[in-house]
DNA sequence: TAGTGGTCTAGACCACATA
DNA sequence: ATGTGGTCTAGACCACTAG
């Protein structure tokens, strides 16, 4: 389970006398080692990692240095600190995390999660665009999902989702129909694929017949097209998602800081 | 200029023995005092604030505590640290900052800034929507700007911008025509109004006659409508901007983390 | 009461920029 | 050589949680 003890020690050197081909401070080297543990699944989402004190002893550094390493993981949303309780591996099951990735919200009233209705789950081969987005070669196997998001029973988003088949063996329409909750939660618990970050590209497009049916709009109506590529550890793409969104009473929200 | 010395001392108390009605750690109290100095304009955008060591002496805290206070300001983009040089008040003149707020980028090739052409600069009174967005009462005086953003000479965004007139006395069409560079840079240097953060709401809409002319698209074409409310210190709204964007060869980019 | 994260200090030394 | 931010340590004590 916990293989940090097998990690070779960092190069021995006097305190504060660290050096490297490319200079990296001690806390960052340690952060990277912790990140390796997370990637390997030594600690599962939602569970506590060892305490600061224990990790500091293991790595033979001061608690302050250990703290800085964990601080970076926390600010990158890899772990969540809870005073008095411990430090926990972040999980897409947490409401706070789900909220971070919920961008479509009603013009009036508070944001609330959608319910999904899966329309399709089919295995096939990546076309040029999907392959490019996922960092695959054209023709490599992918899973294609299609789903409708409903807010208050009203269809508002039609999502087409492509996944690299290699990482999602055993994903079926039945499994999706059973599952309720965030898709990334399922990826995480069923396939050990943890979504870390995503990049989105947004355009305005005219509704095609496909969307006309699903969303019940007139042909040519303006829709928001949201393309999202999600990444896991090591910037490996794990999902390409294209959403077509009806934005008459909803909008995409974003904070610039 | 530098009025920190006049700030009353923090309540005297033994190290580590701080208490308050609502508990706030020392470094956060100090951060708030620094924020007051920034708000008052004690240190101007682009200039260096006093060194960590000097500030620590002024506030009678350790350098480590001072450091944490400044760290928070840096992570909130209020200041920028430069090793060996000092800590500087963030400014919208910096390319890195401009890039943070540049969301419309070409589908192919590297992002690059637009050139503006101002079409209008008129004083008037806030309607219901503008007033609501800016936190004013309907009828309060506002300045209304209209401008076209061109990328490679091609018009791609039509912006309508409303500003509270009170904070922008002396803003004229001539002044805008002379200025080249980011609008927030002008706000900052000419009016002492520093943009800190913004909230955006995005929809897809059909082009109206107004946009048809300016952007040269067919009536009813899908356009991205980006509403932005910008805030300065203390969450005071200083700008409401509505952009209509042609997204055939451009898109709105966003990172989810 | 014990364990965890959070704050604060004092001091040494490193990395970087500038003169 | 000097001044700035950046790293690291060792230790004390505070705040929060749970048995």
Image (cartoon, coloured by chain):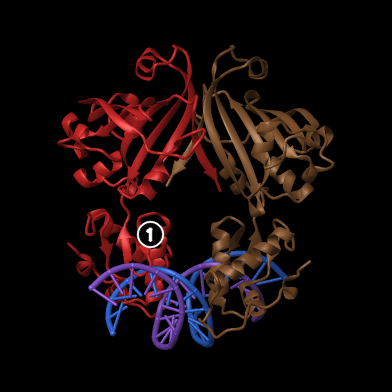
Chain colours: A brown, B red, C purple, D blue
Q: Residue D14, percent across and down?
A: 48, 75
Vertical position of residue A50 compared to residue A60: above or below: above
Q: In this rendering, does residue B26 appear at all?
A: no
Quadrant housing residue B183:
top left
Vertical position of residue B128 compared to residue A51: above or below: above
Graded by Cα atoms within 10 Å as few (under 14), some (14 to 19) or many (20 or more), the crowding at tag 1 reads many
The chain letter for the residue carrying disc 1 is B
| Residue behind mark 1 | B73
Q: In this rendering, does residue B151 appear at all?
A: yes
Q: Between A67 and A22, which is closer to the camera in this rendering?
A: A22
Quadrant housing residue A134:
top right
Vertical position of residue A57 compared to residue B143: above or below: below
Quadrant housing residue D4:
bottom left
Could you tell me which secondary element the residue under label 1 belongs to? helix
Q: Residue B72, percent across and down?
A: 41, 61
Q: Residue A199, percent across and down?
A: 57, 42
Vertical position of residue B28 compared to residue A245: above or below: below
Residue at 60% from the left image edge and 66% from the top image edge: A31
Q: Residue A201, percent across and down?
A: 54, 35
Residue at 63% from the left image edge and 31% from the top image edge: A242
């Amino acid at each position: 389970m916990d293989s940090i003890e097998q990690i070779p020690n960092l190069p021995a050197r006097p305190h504060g006398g660290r050096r490297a081909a490319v200079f990296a401070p001690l806390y960052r080297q340690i952060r990277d080692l912790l990140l390796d543990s997370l990637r390997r699944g030594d600690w599962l989402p939602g569970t506590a990692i060892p305490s600061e004190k224990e990790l500091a002893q293991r790595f033979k550094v001061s608690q302050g240095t250990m703290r800085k390493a964990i601080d970076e993981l926390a600010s990158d949303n890899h772990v969540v600190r809870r005073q008095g309780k411990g430090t926990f591996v972040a999980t897409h099951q947490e409401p706070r995390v789900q909220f971070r990735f919920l961008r479509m919200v009603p013009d009036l009233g508070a944001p609330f999660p959608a319910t999904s209705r899966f329309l399709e789950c089919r295995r096939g081969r990546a076309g040029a665009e999907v392959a490019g987005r996922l960092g695959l070669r054209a023709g490599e196997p992918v899973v294609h999902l299609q789903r409708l998001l409903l807010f208050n029973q009203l269809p508002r988003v039609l999502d087409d989702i492509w996944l690299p088949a290699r990482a999602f063996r055993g994903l079926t329409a039945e499994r999706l129909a059973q599952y309720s909750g965030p898709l990334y939660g399922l990826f995480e618990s069923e396939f050990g694929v943890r979504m870390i970050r995503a990049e989105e590209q947004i355009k305005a497009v005219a509704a095609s017949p496909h969307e006309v049916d699903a969303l019940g709009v007139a042909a040519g109506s303006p829709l928001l097209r949201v393309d999202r590529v999600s990444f896991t550890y090591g910037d490996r793409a794990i999902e390409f998602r294209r959403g077509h969104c009806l934005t008459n009473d909803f909008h995409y929200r974003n904070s610039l800081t």
